[in-house]
Amino acid sequence: MAEPCEMTSEVLARTRAGPLEIAIVGAPLLCVEAGGTANLDPHRGEARVSNAGATPVDLLVNHGPDGAIQSFRTTRVWQEDGTALSFPPPPLRAERIEVRRVTLAPGEGFALTPWARHLGAIQRVVAEGGGAGDHLFGVEYRVALAIDGANGPSPVEEHLQATVRARLTDG
């Protein structure tokens, strides 16, 4: 009998870049069914970006041709022992990226959902390797925006790492 499991969201990592506060919010515990068929997408996490400064900030956010946000994605995943997990990065040529402007007043924020394929990789390892207890994974997220100022765009790129546990459940 597998251990009980419940997924909730909390801040996994946080940083500050100029006037921006960036927090990665997601499930620190992923519940993986023995068959590996559960939809974990609602728990993939998001980047919450807020303006902690005293003046409005114009941000430039990259979108793909299908409207998917390209400014936030998972870049690496590894097991507790350091073994890297492979997952395909989203294919997108630079000329197909659309830049959209978001203006944040002081104290305002918005959320970016990632193009994240790391959940499937974690799910496969836990469902196939199984075993009782929690499995630990490191996940690196990349947030890449630009602040559009008087002198043109100023890139903001942050790499944040979080530890995620995954537990095999009965489903």
Image: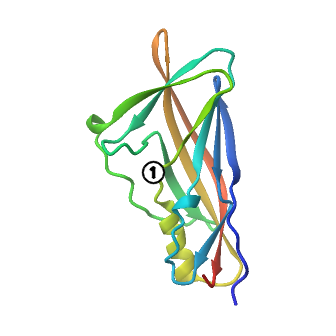
In the foreground, 41 or 118: 41
Locate residue 98, reporting x and y percent.
34, 33
Residue type highlighted by circle 1: Trp
Locate residue 117, reporting x and y percent.
46, 59
Q: Looking at the picture, does residue 163 appear above or below residue 120?
A: above
Q: Looking at the image, which residue is at 50% across and 51% down?
A: 74
Q: Looking at the image, which residue is at 60% across and 81% down?
A: 171
Residue at the top extreme of this rendering = 150
- Picture colour scheme: rainbow
In the foreground, 45 or 82: 45
Q: Looking at the image, which residue is at 43% across and 62% down?
A: 87
- Asked if residue 108 lies left or right of residue 40, the reply is right
Locate residue 13, reporting x and y percent.
68, 46
Image quarter (top left, top right, bottom left or bottom right) of the N terminus: bottom right
Element at badge 1? loop
Q: Looking at the picture, does residue 101 appear above or below residue 83?
A: above
Residue at the bottom extreme of this rendering = 1
- Label 1 sits on residue: 115
In the foreground, 81 or 121: 121
Q: Quadrant of residue 40?
A: bottom right
- Asked if residue 97 lies left or right of residue 134, the reply is left
Total number of numbered discs in the rendering: 1
* Neighbours of disc 1 within 10 Å: few (<14), some (14-19), many (20+): some
Locate residue 111, reporting x and y percent.
57, 40
Q: Looking at the image, which residue is at 40% across and 45% down?
A: 68
